[in-house]
């Protein structure tokens, strides 16, 4: 846990510094937390992309704690411990579902990875493959992004690095057919996991969203309950726009989990809390660096500790 917490603290340092810095600035200036400072606190929390619902709940609990003498959420000096309240509420909001990858009753477990271009989707596919290989699982990769230049080559390079075979076709080929062939190969080779890297697409591009929906239908002709996981890669630096992406992808594909990437490069890491609370889609992994082992299984308590410690 110490190693995981340290990874989270390093990756969330920018978000932590902004979030806790704003809270301390407000509380230091107005320790009694008058209505004006509470409004400022609400604006600061929303500004850190923690989500409107979560921000309102934190402010409401802080207001109640301010009105009650001797509350446990007060510090030794009698001031309300705003950071402790925020950490507790964020931790509760982050517990929205099972965090471990689902497993098929009979291998292979099929994982579909989706997301807009630039979110780190293909890299996350490779990092997930690396993690599964480290756990002793056999993994096959499917290069179903037949639209983006060099996408197939990129996945093949990652396949070599992680020791995973890659099933691929030609650019412009039917991605659903490639996914079907990859599933056939995964079954015949008795692989534990098939990871399908799909074309990056804007959530507003109906034709590409329809292409992924078609892929799901084709896969289910071979394995009726596949894909067993549909993971959406979200770039944390996009802040609240990521919430809109998650909403649209979830409506189109039935997203079962999130991979939040680039947390180490942003002060908008609070969006993880917002998405969990508002959409009830669990974050399964977070990306806190560029290395193969920088994709970390999500832990709500460790995340909240790192955010508000």
Image: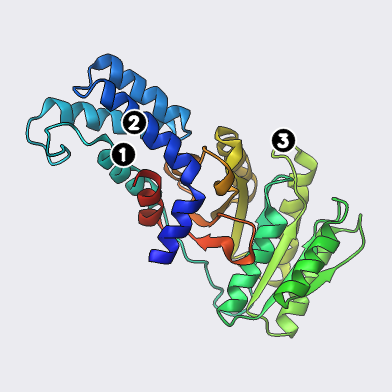
Identify the image quadrant of the N terminus. bottom left
User: Would residue 56 be seen by someone viewing this image from the given angle?
Assistant: no
Q: Earlier in the sequence, mark 3 or mark 2?
A: 2
In three-dimensional space, the C-alpha distance between marks 3 and 1, rounded to whole angstroms, equals 34 Å
Q: Secondary structure at mark 3?
A: loop
Please tell me the numbered disc located at residue 197: none
In three-dimensional space, the C-alpha distance between marks 3 and 2, rounded to whole angstroms, equals 36 Å
Q: Residue at 76% across / 39% down in the picture?
A: 206
Q: Secondary structure at mark 1?
A: helix
Q: Which residue is mark 1?
A: 86
Please tell me the numbered disc located at residue 23: 2
Q: Earlier in the sequence, mark 3 or mark 1?
A: 1
Q: Where is residue 237? Give x, y as percent.
A: 60, 39
Q: Earlier in the sequence, mark 1 or mark 2?
A: 2
**13 on left or right of 301:** right
Q: Where is residue 85? Give x, y as percent.
A: 26, 39
**82 on left or right of 307:** left
Q: Is residue 28 above or below residue 253?
A: above
Q: Which residue is mark 3?
A: 204
How crowded pointer 1 is (Cα within 10 Å; few <14, some 14-19, many 20+) is rated as many
| Nearest to the observer: residue 89 or residue 38 | 38
Q: Which of labels 1 and 2 is toward the front?
A: 2
Q: Are marks 1 and 2 in contact (CB under 8 Å)?
A: yes
Q: Secondary structure at mark 2?
A: helix
Q: Are marks 3 and 2 in contact (CB under 8 Å)?
A: no
């Amino acid at each position: 846990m110490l190693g995981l917490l340290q990874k989270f603290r390093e990756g969330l340092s920018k978000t932590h510094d902004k979030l806790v810095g704003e809270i301390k600035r407000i509380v230091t200036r107005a320790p009694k937390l008058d209505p004006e400072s509470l409004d400022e606190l609400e604006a600061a929390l929303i500004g850190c992309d923690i989500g409107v619902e979560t921000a309102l709940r934190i402010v409401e609990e802080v207001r109640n704690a301010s009105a009650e003498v001797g509350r446990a959420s007060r510090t030794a000096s009698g001031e309300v411990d705003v950071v402790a309240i925020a950490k507790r509420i964020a931790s509760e909001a982050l517990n929205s579902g099972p965090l471990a990858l689902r497993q098929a009753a009979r291998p292979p477990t099929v994982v579909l990875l989706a997301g807009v271009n630039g979110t780190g989707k293909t890299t996350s596919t490779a990092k997930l493959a690396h993690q599964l290989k480290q756990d002793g699982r056999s993994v096959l990769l499917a290069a179903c992004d037949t639209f983006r230049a060099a996408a197939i080559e990129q996945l093949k390079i990652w396949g070599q690095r992680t020791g995973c075979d890659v099933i691929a076709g030609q650019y412009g080929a039917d991605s659903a057919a490639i996914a079907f062939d990859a599933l056939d190969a995964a079954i015949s080779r008795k692989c534990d996991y098939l990871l399908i890297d799909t074309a990056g697409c804007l959530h507003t591009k109906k034709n590409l969203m329809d292409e992924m929906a078609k892929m799901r239908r084709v896969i289910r002709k071979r394995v009726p309950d596949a894909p067993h996981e549909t993971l959406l890669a979200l770039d944390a630096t996009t802040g609240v726009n990521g919430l809109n992406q998650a909403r649209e992808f979830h409506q189109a594909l039935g997203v079962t989990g999130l991979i939040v990437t680039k947390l180490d490069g942003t002060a908008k890491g609070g969006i993880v809390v917002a998405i969990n609370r508002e959409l009830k889609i669990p974050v399964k992994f977070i990306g806190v660096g560029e290395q193969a082992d920088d994709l970390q299984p999500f832990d709500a308590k460790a995340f909240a500790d790192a955010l508000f410690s």
